Image: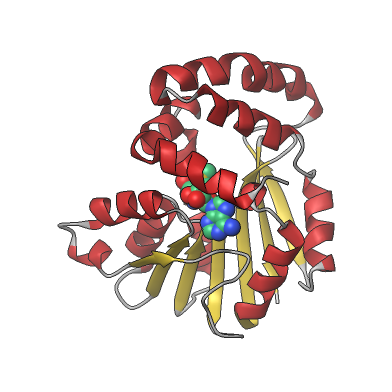
Amino acid sequence: MPEGKAVQSMFAGIAGRYDVANHLLSFGVDYHWRKVLVERVAARQPKDVVDLATGSGDVAFALKKRLGADVKVQGLDFCEPMLDEARRKQQGEDLLEDIRFAFGDCLHLPLEDASVDVLTISFGLRNLENRDRGLKEMQRVLRPGGALIVLEFTQPDAWLKPFYYAYLRGILPLFAKLITRDKAAYEYLGGSIASFPSRPELAAEMKQAGFGEVRYRGLTGGIVALHEASV
Ligand SMILES: C[S@@+](CC[C@H](N)C(=O)[O-])C[C@H]1O[C@@H](n2cnc3c(N)ncnc32)[C@H](O)[C@@H]1O
């Protein structure tokens, strides 16, 4: 698993160009993935949601727009330049200005025990220095009946693997260098995806960390998975 400080400075280095790179390198499919996540959250009718590793805030914004003014939405991240992007983007829209963006490390969450209905984490779990510790922290802060909903790259379906890994190793770092001027960050992305657990392996890790029922499904040929773990 990657070293936290290195992850922090890598995201600080690309914060201003993160959104553009994200949308271009995923061919815009990231909007769809986020929508699926938000609908799963809405189905649980939470009173409050905390989006972990929120980055530039797009999941928090989509949650707020879908859930409305009565549901409290917060975004936490340990990289201040990414949070600054989120704060910049929320300016001028009353509904979005309601979201609190704050420093929060997933390994030491600044939240009380059993205090949150739903936690979301989108493309963040893969970056944690200690995934087991992070999952246990998430379990700690959820109320009984609450849920953690994770969107993350994973190992795709077998037929797609050769093309996908060729894209990750060959094309993605080159495109990324043009967009972000940081090829290393996207070489890291490819490597971290290839070494991430499969869907059932991640579900097993979640249960090991103390979650009860864990359901999961693949999206877009299994490039991305959505895991929903209940407390
Ligand atoms: C790939 S970005 C994802 C941002 C956003 N969730 C999205 O879907 O676009 C990963 C984010 O995870 C954050 N991150 C990584 N490790 C973290 C940790 N231990 N605690 C909090 N944030 C972390 C990084 O700072 C970065 O903003």
Q: Is 154 above or below relative to 207?
A: above
Viewed as shown, does residue 35 lie left or right of 214? left
Residue 195 horizontal side relative to residue 14, left or right: right
- At 38% from the left and 67% from the top, the residue drawn is 67
Q: Is residue 152 above or below residue 20?
A: below
Quadrant in the picture for residue 64? bottom left
Q: Pick the residue in front: 104 or 3.
A: 3
Q: Position of residue 80 (x, y in %)?
A: 39, 55
Q: Residue furthest left?
A: 92
Residue at image x 36%, y 34%?
17
Residue 110 to residue 12: above or below: below
- Residue 34 visible to an observer of this rendering: no
Question: Is 92 left or right of 177, judged from the image as shown?
Answer: left
**Residue lying at 71% horizontally and 40% vertically, measured from the top left:** 154
Q: Is residue 127 left or right of residue 210?
A: left
Quarter assignment of residue 211 = bottom right
Residue located 69% across and 36% down the image: 193
| Front residue (pair 32, 99) | 99
Q: Nearer the viewer, residue 142 or 104?
A: 104
